Amino acid sequence: MRLSDCSVCPGPKSRTRTWRGAWIALLAVILTHVMAAPTLANDADVQTTWRLLDYVAVDYAGAVSGGQVTSETEYAEMIEFAGQVETRLKALPDKSGKDDLVRRSAALRAAIEAKAAPEEVATQSRSLASALLAAYPVPLAPTAPPDVARGAALYTQNCASCHGAAGDGKGPNAAGLDPPPIDFTDRARADQRSLFGLYQVITQGLEGTSMTSFESLSEQDRWALAYVAGAFAYPSSAAGAGEKLWQDASVRARNPNMASLVGAIPADLAAEIGPDKAEALIAYLRRHPEAVSTRAGGSLALTRERLGASLKAYAAGDRKAATDLALSAYLDGFEPVEPVLTARDSALMVRIEQAMGELRAAIAKGSPLAEVQTANQQLARLFDEADAALAPEMASSTSSFLGAFGVLLREGLEALLIVVAMIAFLRKTERTEEVGYVHGGWIAALAAGVGTWFVATYFISISGASRELTEGFGSLFAAIILLTVGIWMHGKSYAEAWQRYIQEKMTRALSRSSSWFLFALAFLVVYREVFETILFYAALWAQGDGLAMLGGMLAAAALLAVLAWIMLSYSARLPITQFFAWSAILIAVLAVVLAGKGIAALQEAGMLGVVPLSGVPRIQVLGLFPTTETVLAQLAVVVILIAGFYLNYLNRRSATRADAA
């Protein structure tokens, strides 16, 4: 079999072009919608702009006092940073609220040029930074509590030489540095600096200073360094009092999640609860980040926060901002806990996912405010249920085992069916020398999956949007290939068609291009599932009970191996025409399933809109979702399959008449 053989059905070229053109048209429609989707801001661009604003808010006081410049170097830096903020905001993707951000950045730059009071500049900077994150939401917190002990070791290794072992800026290499290293023990300055601001400087460095980027460190290591640097100004002797304060539910409510903790400004907290209490609380939490839950409550609190902001934006008439915030609520808030919730209560997870889709749809079509409020309230009730399901006491060895077992079995079955069909085909056609390409493809996919886990753990964080886009485009591409292969196999399910194929092709070896096609197809369908499984397992592993999880994984792998052996044994006994007929049906069904899943993933990533479709059940294993877009995509694939199968019938009838003549 050559690549050209499995890419077209037998018959006149005009008919081949007809159904081939159909799926190309389908792909064109999909790409048209994708290209029309709003451009998303790059997280790094937004975070860099936020960092500059944070730096201005904190350091402007060291440049101007009483309307007079006290440090020419610092003042020149403030002017430069204000200009960079304005330039970077103008370069962000267009969306509602951008013009206001640019206007406010110009006002900030003018205030600095006019040598305005530090309090005024700090207020404008922080207000603009908050508005920036509301308009362009980005993840602002670590995915798990940082390891402070490791952070201390990293500080000694990388930072103490300049900033000093005690963080006072008097390290052995500090002499001669201009500007001098930051004194982390400076309480006045520390009170104005959030952990997120420190993390940003550690990640990106600071132009014009000796502070270089530490982006080579993992994300968690950079957060750990931020916690260590941010704790120097708050004595460890106060941590005991902070721990007692943390037992107060009203105090915990002020820092419900990791995002609120890393974004908190100590001075603001001091204004709310008093300087002594704020000092004690900061001293405790920055040394014990594990005290703030990053499991269900933390992530879902972020979701509620973004949904609340979305509702406010909608009430103010800003539908675009409301849509972006609702999308961020799903991708940055809910999706991190989705694997664990799926393992513990899959039905609840589906209800939340569907309710969030309905909320986004209501915002998109401009529904009455009361309807959007009702959708928010429904989600709040569902999140209360999720909080209960995700509570630490609900974790058990059984749930970890079943979660790991279910994830691998569900994600692996689709890939297994396709890979087994490819191997069975090669054996049926006595092309066993090409089986190695198929095995090489799925083995490479497993290796790439391990690489994905390593990179995601130690170098970058895979966002919810990236995950959904990878799954979505991978599913659609696989669906298009399977659509082609399914029609081709159906064309070979007639005995006479198969005999002609044997006479024409069996004397030829597979071309090198088609061999690598087999490798690529095996890699694509397996990596798509491995990618999803790796992310699920990473979340499950963080919940503890790793032995139970490994047991579930091994049990699912064993079951998949047994299923593969059964399918290969059964296919070996099937007559070749029946094999092609059943394989064509199987691959056609998988093409329909993947088309639905691909569109659904792009909807969850915000690349495609959501139009709910009442009366349609949600059957995820079949790729069936109650939205107009997913159903239309699946119907389009079904129509193309029917057309392809019918053309195969016409070709068979024409060939039979020609043989009779």
Image (cartoon, rainbow, N blue to C red):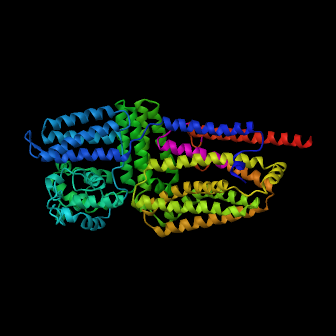
User: Residue 461: percent from the left, percent from the top?
Assistant: 40, 55
Q: Which residue lies furthest to the bottom in this view?
A: 547
Is residue 351 found inside the magenta-colored segment of the image? no
At 43% from the left edge and 56% from the top edge, which residue is drawn? 390
Q: In this view, does 66 lie above or below 274?
A: above
Quadrant assignment, res 373: top left
Q: In which quarter of the image is the N terminus?
A: bottom right
Q: Is residue 35 visible?
A: yes
Question: Percent position (x, y) of residue 174?
Answer: 16, 62
Q: Where is residue 565 in the image (x, y as percent from the top left)?
A: 69, 65
In the image, is 376 to the left or to the right of 594? left
Q: Is 599 rendered above or below residue 205?
A: above
Give the magenta range.
589-616
**How many labels were placed on the picture?**
0
Task: Give the percent coordinates (x, y) of residue 235.
Answer: 17, 63
* Residue 596 lies in the magenta-colored region: yes
Q: For the view shown, which residue lies furthest in the right direction?
A: 661
Q: Is residue 345 above or below residue 361?
A: below
Tell me: 319 left or right of 417. left
- Nearer to us in this view, 375 or 212: 212
Image point (35%, 56%), residue name = 142
Query: Which is nearer the eye, 238 or 241?
Result: 238
| Left or right of 111, for residue 539 | right
Could you tell me if residue 253 is visible in this image?
A: no
Q: Quadrant of the C terminus?
A: top right
User: In which image quadrant can residue 123 be found?
Assistant: top left
